[in-house]
Image (cartoon, rainbow, N blue to C red):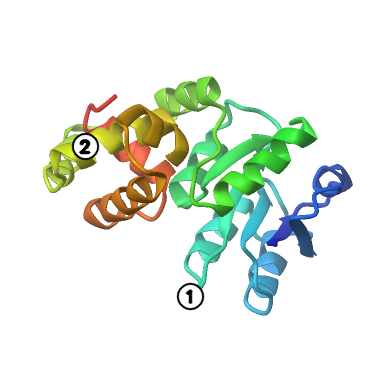
Amino acid sequence: MIRVMIVDDDALVRLGLEGDEEINVVVQAFDGLQAVELATTHHVDVALVDVRMPRMDGITAIAHLRALPHPPKVIALTTFDLDEYVYNALAAGADGFLLKDTDPVEILRAVHLVATGSAMLHPAAARRLIDRYHRSGPPQAVDARARLDRLTPRERDVLTLVARGDTNADIAASLGMRESTVKAHVSRILTALDVTNRVQTALLARDAGLG
């Protein structure tokens, strides 16, 4: 059972999660401050967080949620796919983003994907978003390349596909590995690159000129 927190006042988001026997909406918050408070008293696997909220905005809330001792995976919600706040949410630790009018089937798929450690990004929109708002200067590029030097050649192969947005299953099929082996590689990559999730891994890879 995937325990979900919705951080949004839009009832349609909650409706999109109904009907899946493997998903349980355990708590709902109406702004970022309430979300952080509730996350400390409820076990949450995945949080769906609106980017624009009163009192504490979604970006700040995501950073606080990811800093918890047992942080939930986070999916940022937004109205526009080319919104600088979405990039900031990903940089704060979100594992992906969805548009608020996303088909309910895709919302369910996103929750399942991030719960297992994958990212959920709309590939074309994600590339445009990163290209528009993630402008790295020479210091960032040098640092990113130095971090990539910590990886083995096989880990670089895996990283290239992670940066492309592939799931663990996709990577396993592409590289002829078991999915459990891919998961182990991804875990080592996150540690070596000193990042917290696959989205930040992809951003760092782009900084280094990979992909």
Give how far across and how far down residue 154 sits, in percent. 19, 39
- Of the two numbered discs 1 and 2 in the rendering, the one whose residue sits closer to the viewer: 2
Amino acid type shown at disc 2: Arg
The residue positioned 48% from the left and 75% from the top of the image is 69
Q: Residues within 10 Å of mark 1 (few under 14, many from 20)?
A: few
The quarter of the picture where residue 202 lies is top left
Give how far across and how far down residue 109 sits, in percent. 66, 39
* Residue 187, above or below 106: below
Q: Is residue 127 left or right of residue 154?
A: right
Earlier sequence position, callout 1 versus callout 2: 1
* Residue 72, above or below 152: below
What residue did someone put label 2 on?
Answer: 156
Viewer-proximal residue among 133 and 108: 108
Task: Report, in whole angstroms, how far the alpha carbon at label 1 lies from the one at label 2.
Answer: 29 Å
Secondary structure found at label 2: helix
Viewer-proximal residue among 131 and 44: 44
Q: Is residue 56 left or right of residue 64?
A: right
Please say if the residues under marks 1 and 2 sit with CB atoms less than 8 Å apart. Answer: no
Viewer-proximal residue among 172 and 120: 172
Which disc number belongs to residue 69? Answer: 1
Give how far across and how far down residue 13 sits, in percent. 81, 45
Q: Residues within 10 Å of mark 2 (few under 14, many from 20)?
A: some
* Res 140 seen here: no
* Residue 24, above or below 107: below
The residue positioned 71% from the left and 59% from the top of the image is 4
Amino acid type shown at disc 1: Pro
The residue positioned 69% from the left and 75% from the top of the image is 42
